[in-house]
Image: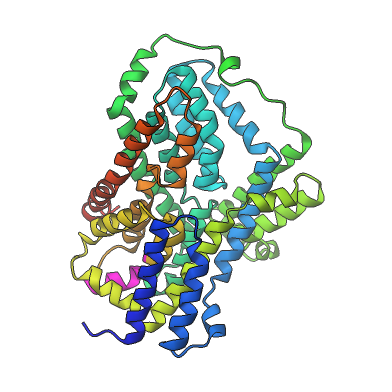
Amino acid sequence: MDISTAALMSLVALAIVVIISCVNEDLNVGYLAIGFAIIVGGIWGGTNGAAVLKGWPLDLFMILIGVTFLFGIARTNGTMEKVTAYSIRVCKGNTALVPFIIFILTTFITTIGPGNIAGTALMAPVAMAIATRVGMPAFLMTLLVVGAANGAAFSPFAPTGIISNGIIAKMGPTLGITDLSGLAWKIHFNSELAQGLVNIGGFFVLGGWAWIRNQKGQSIDIDELAPRPEPFDKYQWMTLGSILILILAIVLPGLPAIKPLVKGWAILNLASNVGTVAFILAGFLMLAGAGDSEKAVKAQPWAVIIMVCGVSVLIDVMDKAGGLNALVKIIGAISNPTTINGWLGLITGVISAYSSSSGVVMPMFLPMVPGLIKEVGGGNPIALISSINIGAHLVDTSPLSTLGALCIACAGDHEDKARLFRNLLIWGLSMSVVGAIVCFVFFGLLNF
């Protein structure tokens, strides 16, 4: 395979960024990726630095800023905490229902917008305290919380889903994709199905079923398990209303029965995507005094946003230099339209176990989808996209990831933290292989 110097150097630059992201989590490789992009583009690609910076994914960046700021307000003004507390009380002291309530609640919270990291940060302290009180091993509770958060991470309202959909939108015309809204929900469903099956299955097989059977007939004072919070104040009701409007403004216009009715409405210009709606609603909440904008800005996941956008700049340079095509040919050489899904699940899982799933792995692999389909002579783009996304996120139960680390940090004092770390590490790393099998079966053989 012939490869130009520019393509080779772009691959070398990407490899350095990936390796550094694996060995040094404190270093934001987004900034590093931009620096490498300017060097590669300037020296070997014949492109000046200003042109390289035009590769910054502005649309994706603005959507992420709008949505994460709105939910930053919801988190910092106490709205999401009260939603969590009231939801936990649904089990009414029936301890056997706790695992199901935790899984459903984490799924719901992640889906409506905060995302998997914020959802886990919100749920882990509550879930681990409850696990201690009802005698559930922290390992099992981690499978529930992280599994639910990652399964729902590809919601069109959540940061990870926005990242995925933003990258897909750029290559949509190449793939012949026109219904981006329908595609977003299909990818979300695929993630829920695959990750739910693996994590809930792991929960039951590794002791969860035995624990539930032992809870038969047992109950606990719900006010002890989850004390009743103060009622929502007017600002929190405003926040809840804003979140509901955000969901309706994005979901309703895309429904077949609604689409003809709203076609041509000028207001749709304001609601062109989830980011624009979020900016409008966040502005209303700020003017109404419903949130502290300074705290909300600090609550935004800036590190991940910069990482995603920075790596996207380097991938843009790679694409123009021919490096992306070279990487596609390497993966295509060992694959066919059926096995490509398993290979993508394995490769993304191995890299993601030591690196950022949404910040490095997704921006690196998703742009390869059109080239991979051409290289292997076929394939379902939704299946390939789902394989990349699921393979990259199944491993996040590992304590090397933010989600796994949050759960360990919140585990009860009675837990053997070293043993919990080891068990989660074994489970997380094994998910790279499990993810490959799941992606091969679901998206290769069954063609979901």
Percent x, y of residue 101: 48, 28
Q: Nearer the viewer, residue 21 or 444?
A: 21
Residue 59 at x, y percent in the picture: 57, 68
Region in magenta: 365-376
Q: Quadrant of residue 15?
A: bottom left
Residue at the spot 49% in from the left edge and 18% down from the top edge: 133
Q: Is residue 103 above or below residue 153?
A: above
Residue 401 on image: x %, y %: 42, 47
* Residue at x 70%, y 65% (from the top left corner): 266
Report the side of 384 relative to 51 (left or right).
left
Reply above or below: 45 against 335: below
Q: Is residue 377 visible?
A: no
Q: Is 323 situated left or right of 230 in this image?
A: left
Residue 299 in the image, given as x and y percentages of width and height: 64, 49
Q: Is residue 354 visible?
A: yes
Q: Main secondary structure of the magenta part?
A: helix
Q: Residue at x 27, y 54 (%)?
A: 443
Residue closest to the far top: 217
Residue lying furthest right: 288
Q: Quadrant of residue 171?
A: bottom left
Look at the image and tell me in which quarter the N terminus lies: bottom left
Describe residue 33's horizontal placement relative to residue 11 as left or right: right
As for residue 56 lying within the magenta part, the answer is no
